Image (cartoon, rainbow, N blue to C red):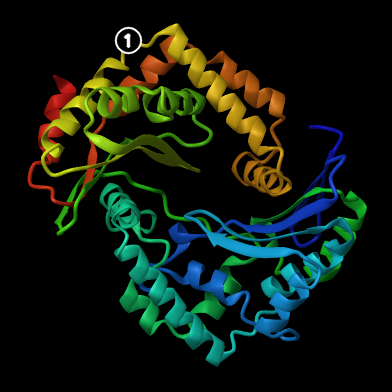
Amino acid sequence: MSDAIRLTRLENGLTIVTERMERVETVSFGAYVGTGTRHEAAAENGVSHFLEHMAFKGTERRSAAEIAEEIEAVGGHINAYTAREQTAYYVKLLKEDLPLGIDIIGDILCHSAFVPEELERERGVILQEIGQANDTPDDIIFDHFQETAFPDQPMGRPTLGREAIIRAMPRATLVEYMARHYAGENTVIAAAGALEHAEVVALVRRHFADLPARPGIVAAAARYRGGEFREARDLDQAHIVLGFPGLAYSDPDYYAALLLSTLLGGGMSSRLFQEVREKRGLVYSIYSFTAPYADGGLFGVYAGTGEKEAAELLPVALGELRKVQDQVGEAELARARAQVKASVLMSLESTGARAEHLARQLQVFGRVIPTEETVARISAVTIADIERTARRLFRAAPTLAALGPIGRVPGVAAIAELLAA
């Protein structure tokens, strides 16, 4: 671990990690709670996201307006996000204002008031957010894909929640969920920038003292099943996601899968972009992606195409998925390595990205992985690794989600046959 990175564990189980960055005048600070959509029961789907919204709507000593005003009075930024395995609350400020940022994040995590009037207002905001997602086909298609890949289980449910559940969710559900899931053992405090570790520890010790000292609740294992979702809509484009069971962060082939995704559909030089868009003009947008989790993941390809082009699109894309299982070249692997290395290193130039990176590594691996080690693992991936990983991924049961004018989109059974050809 770098000399600039320091780690402290408090009595309540809270882990604090900091990285001092020279020649910057700002600091990013965040609380990364190891709970998200996959920790929710069916009847409370969306509660993690609802909590994230309510955190900014008032505490025992600050109103919603005061939270915003105090941060913006010093030129800072405050925000949060909800994911399937994590909920994060973070600020970015000038270095002299870090005590204020830690005070506010600690206040909203330990002393949120859940004022009934604010809760009802925010319920309406979330319902608007759900409606906006439903009206955005290249957004909602991923929820359908996730649910089809992991049906009837927490990993497959939407992060925003379902409209009927959010409408009916009482205040007690939020309070009880926060009491069960927000604890020192499953929370990492991460900060990066112009800071002193000892000062951060002292401030966290003071402002997070009321965070309970108990382990977080372990999520149910994700059980990939796959299958098919189709919804005909009157749209100009068919939105299609084709995917397969992916790899966990800790999987030995994780970096091979990352490079595979990059050379397959990670940029303008990628196979899918060149063959499907540049040579055949079948799409405007096509890309591949990896979505790793603690115990599995997804590997997928998204494409948006016209009704006439839909019949040709998938057979062409599937041809590239077949070829990459035994026809990878040194030049394209070198390009993929360069892209992934650059992405990793460029992202670490931001204080916010560094703080998030530290927290995620501690939550996933239990340690901070040196950047040099990550780069070495990327460099070590061979052609044989890429081809083996492609065979491992693309010979599993596929998942298909299609939305729009989809009459010419092949079904999942036909896709499996084409892959096996």
Front one among 381 and 225? 381
Front one among 237 and 399? 237
The type of residue carrying mark 1 is Gln
Q: Residue at x 49, y 30 (%)?
A: 251
Look at the picture and state if 69 lies above or below 219.
below
Q: Residue at x 30, y 64 (%)?
A: 134
The single residue placed furthest to the top in the displayed view is: 330
| Badge 1 element | loop
User: Which residue is under mark 1?
Assistant: 327
The quadrant in which residue 414 appears is top left
The single residue placed furthest to the left in the displayed view is: 407
Look at the picture and state if 342 lies above or below 230.
above
Look at the picture and state if 109 lies above or below 256.
below
Front one among 176 and 264? 264
Quadrant assignment for the N terminus: top right
Q: Residue at x 53, y 19 (%)?
A: 337
